[in-house]
Each structure stands twice: as C-alpha cells, then as structure tokens.
Image: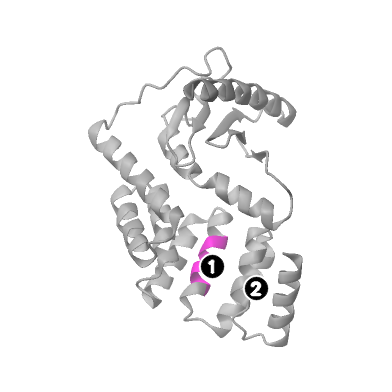
Amino acid sequence: MNDDIRALSAEVARDPASLAFVPLSEALRVRGQLDAATKVALAGMEHHPNLADGHDLYARILADAGDVEGAADEWSIALALDPRHAGAHKGLGFANFRQGDLDAALEHLELALAADPTDQTIVQALQTVRQIAQQAAAHPAEVPERPAVFAGLEGADHGLLLVDPQGRVLAGGLRAQSGHDVAEEVAAYLAGVSQEAERTARLLELGEWRWIMAEGERGHLHLSAPSTSALLLLARDKSVPSGRLAILAARAAEVARRWLEAQTL
C-alpha cells in the first residue's frame, strides 16, 4: 500500500495532469487521510473538471467526512457527465436513503446495478432497501418483535443491535435520542461494513479486524463481529467511558455468540 502511494505520488508530481490522481486520492481516502485525499482530488480535478470518476471520488471523500449533502451534489455532477456512472448512482442511492427517500434510493440503486451487475455491494444495498421499503409499506408504524437475546443486559432493547452482513436485524434494538426506533435503518447502513473493515485492514496490513469504536459529541459506538455471520453494535451516551464501553461490548458479544451458535444446532 505504501509503495503504491509513493509510486502514484511520484507520477502526479512528475505530471500534475496525470489521471493517477484518482487512485492516489482513493488510496489516501481508504487510509483515512481525508485532508490529503481532498487536496489530491481537487488538484487533479482542476486539470480534469469533466471527469466523472473525479467527482465520484470527491463525493466519497465528502461522505466519509460526514458531508452527505455535499457528496450528493458531486454525485449529481458525475451523473450529468456520465448518466450511467455506477458509482454515482450507488452514492446517490446511499444519500437518498440517509434522507429517508426510499423511492429515490431504489431508483438510483437499480440504475447502479444495471450499469455494473457484478458489484455485490450494490446487490446487497438494493436488497436491503427493498426489504425496508416493503416493511415500511406493510407496517408503517410497527416496530418488529425481535428475539430477547440480550435480556438482562443494559440497553438490551434500545442500545444493542445484532445484524447479519446483509443488513438484517437479528436481535436487540436501537433508538435515537429522540426515542424513535432506528434499528432497521442503522442495520442497513451496516450492510457491507464487515467486508469494508476487512478490506481496509488488509490494505493497511493490520491483520484481522476485531472492533471499531467511534466517539461522538453526544454518545459513543462500539462495533464488533461476534461471529463471521453477524455484527454487533453497542451505543451509549457520552457519560460511559471508552473502557467501560469495551467491557459492555465484550459481554454482549459473548451472549450474542452463544445465541448464534444455538441457532445452528
């Protein structure tokens, strides 16, 4: 990975108009170096303002930084340049889903799949959004009953969520601070996270990934994989220190692991 970045950096330094800026910026994005990725992407787009791949790349950088609206604008530009751009349709599907527009999300994901039928991440995303749309149509105000896997654990029905790699809820529950159920939506976001975590860890030569922790202004998240067929998300408010969060997550992961093993018997 480092060798690739060095080689691509040398190519861009030698020729600022080189299209090598695209894989270079992408490599930096994957490594989490968003400022550097942004600098490379914007410099390259000055030479190639009509390159759809460039706008798609910059959109993904913005999405990683949390600017979904800015990312949607860039994906829209990419589609104006190339109406069949799979990455841009996939990105707008994600953005529309985040905004709660399931119809628009489905439309873009279907167009993305038509442009690139081999992309399994698009297939999974489309299946997940279709399922959520069907559930919303059939039970618009109903919260599905789920197995009481985490009974007795803190946050069993509102702060612990067990999902499969396709983004389906297996057990637990998750509620926003406003109190409304967000389990299905969050589960959909987690679809494909395990593969992306494995890919990133492999590219960075970190070995097998174990867990991911995120600290926010109002709370903290802990994501782990109790088995190869499930992801566990634990959410707590900011009063819970990271060490305590890790302990709670380990306990919940063990409970989830035993339940998952029982399902295969």
Residue in view at x 51 percent, y 29 percent: 161
Residue where numbered disc 1 is placed: 57
Considering every residue shown, the one lying at the far top of the view is 152
Q: Main secondary structure of the magenta part?
A: helix
Q: Please give left or right for residue 260 compared with residue 119 in the image.
A: right
- Left or right: 27, with 95 as reference point: right
Residue at x 46% of width, y 58% of height: 69
**Residue type, label 1:** Leu
Q: How far from the left and from the top, in percent, is residue 126?
A: 36, 50
Residue 57 falls inside the magenta stretch: yes
Q: Can residue 48 be seen in this view?
A: yes
**Mark 2 Cα within 10 Å, few/some/many (few <14, many 20+)?**
many
- Splitting the image into 4 quarters, where does residue 140 fall? top left
Residue 197 to residue 30: above or below: above
Q: On residue 40, which mark appears?
A: 2
Task: Return the residue nearer the eye: 101 or 113.
Answer: 113
Residue 35: give x, y in percent of width and height: 67, 63
Question: With respect to residue 102, does 228 lie above or below?
Answer: above
126 or 89, which is in the foreground?
126
Q: In the rendered structure, does residue 133 fall within the stretch colored magenta? A: no
The spot of residue 193 in percent (x, y) is 54, 46
What is the quadrant of the N terminus in the image? bottom right
Residue 239 position within the rendered picture, expressed as x and y whole percent measured from the top left: 67, 26
> Where is 88 relative to 189, above or below?
below
Q: Give the residues in magenta.
A: 54-61
What residue type is disc 2 on?
Val
Q: In which quarter of the image is residue 36?
A: bottom right
Q: Distance between the residues labelled 2 and 1?
A: 11 Å
